[in-house]
Every structure is written in C-alpha cells, then in structure tokens.
Amino acid sequence: MKSLFSRALITGAATSSVLLLGAGIAAAHVTVVAPGAAQGGYSVLTFRVPTESDAASTTALRVELPDLKSARTEPIPGWTAVIERDDTTQAATAVTWTADPGVGVQPGQFQQFVLSAGPLPATEDVAFPAIQTYSDGEVVAWDEAVGADGSEPSKPAPTLTLAPSSGDGHGHSVDSGSSSESASATHTSEAGADNVARLLGGGGLVLGALGAALGLGAVIRGRR
C-alpha cells in the first residue's frame, strides 16, 4: 500500500516538473513579435529579452537586420541604441542596444526593445539573429535555425512569420506612427504568452495533486 502511494506521488511530481520546466524554457528565449507584419510592409518589431542568469544582468543586445531601408528605435531610459548601415546602400544591417553604467535587465526580469522598420523581406519567415551580453562578460548567441525535422534548437534565432503582401507595395503594414498602439498589442500578446506559461505550471501542480489523491484512494481501498 505504501508502494502504491509513493508511486502515485512520484508520478504526479514528475509530471508537474516536466510541465513547469517546459514553460520556463519557452519563456526564456529571446523572441520577436510584430502584429500584422507582412511581406514588403513596414512594421513595429518588439524584441523581448529575458535575463536567464541568476547573478548577472543583461547589458547589451545586438540584432541583425535583413538590409532594411528604414529602421528607427524607440527611446529606452538608460539605454543607447546604434543602427549599423551598409556603406554603399545605407540599408540597416544591425541594431545594438547598450545599457548605461549601472543599468541593465536584472535577473528574473525582461526588457522589450522596439524597432520601427521596413520594408520587410518578401519571404514567409524572417530571422533576426541576436547576441545577448551579460554584466559578467557572458555572451549568448541566439542564432540557431529550426531543425530539418521541425525540432526547436536550444538557442533559436528570433523569427517572425510574415503575412502575404497585399500587392499594393505596402503589404499589411503597420504605420510607424502607430507605434504606441502596436506596442500595446505586443504587450497583450506577450502577456498572453506569460498566462499560458502560468496555466501550464498550474496544470502541472493540479496533476501532481491528482496523482497524490489517486495514491490515497488506492491506500484506502487496500485497507478495506
């Protein structure tokens, strides 16, 4: 009877741990979102950067850009943004955000870096390889592609799926003047992702409790 109870508890705890771990890993990736972004259009890109380190803060983020004609950063207090451009075409090839001394994204926190850019490439997906730098000197490259079998790598490059162009040369673009509205939509989207992670974690705890209850039921039936 004790054996049945122990197995039930272990099963519930294992299920809970797997779900919580999966939610944590998904939430730790550097990601990009842009509601309404379309091929050939202009959009507001929001890069979400969580700090994974327990002892150091994020002090810089560099994102590669696919030779964009226009790229404008949104001011962030305590941070400096520099856009790199091709010497010949003047197309934006990368953007780097650097924290001022004493400023950074602390452990357990995240920061959103917003960029108004375009025209976006005429491709179904566009990747934005990124480099995250920590205050202790650690550098993490988020530049890996999805595997041929569809498996997600450990350090995936932030990737955006683009809607087809509307054919008018602008796509379903988001006007750069509506950055506050787009940022609000981005915040809602990210909040939804966090809620999903919390629900998954809560589901794991419920399954763990259910496993314990089943174990107790087995003990009671055995005594009868």
Image (cartoon, grey):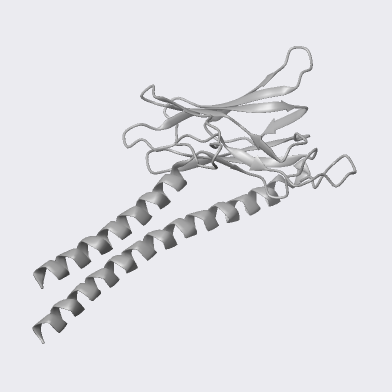
The residue lying toward the viewer, choosing from 173 and 4, is 4
The residue lying toward the viewer, choosing from 151 and 133, is 151
For the N terminus, the image quarter is: bottom left
Q: Is residue 124 left or right of residue 159?
A: right
5 over 20 or under it: above or below: below
The residue lying toward the viewer, choosing from 1 and 101, is 1
Q: Residue at x 12, y 67 (%)?
A: 3
Q: Which residue is drawn at 32% across and 64% down?
A: 205
Q: Which residue is drawn at 11% across and 87% down?
A: 224
Q: Residue lying furthest bottom in this view?
A: 224
**Number of numbered labels in the structure image:** 0
Q: Residue lying furthest top in this view?
A: 87
35 over 131 or under it: above or below: below
Hey, which quadrant is residue 73 in on the image? top right
223 over 163 or under it: above or below: below
| Residue 64 rendering spot, x and y as whole percentages | 62, 26
| Residue 186 rendering spot, x and y as whole percentages | 62, 50
Q: Residue lying furthest right in this view?
A: 168
Q: In this view, does 51 lie to the left or right of 130?
A: left
| Residue 222 rendering spot, x and y as whole percentages | 12, 81
Q: Residue at x 31, y 55 (%)?
A: 17
| Residue 159 rendering spot, x and y as whole percentages | 61, 39
Hey, which quadrant is residue 12 in on the image? bottom left
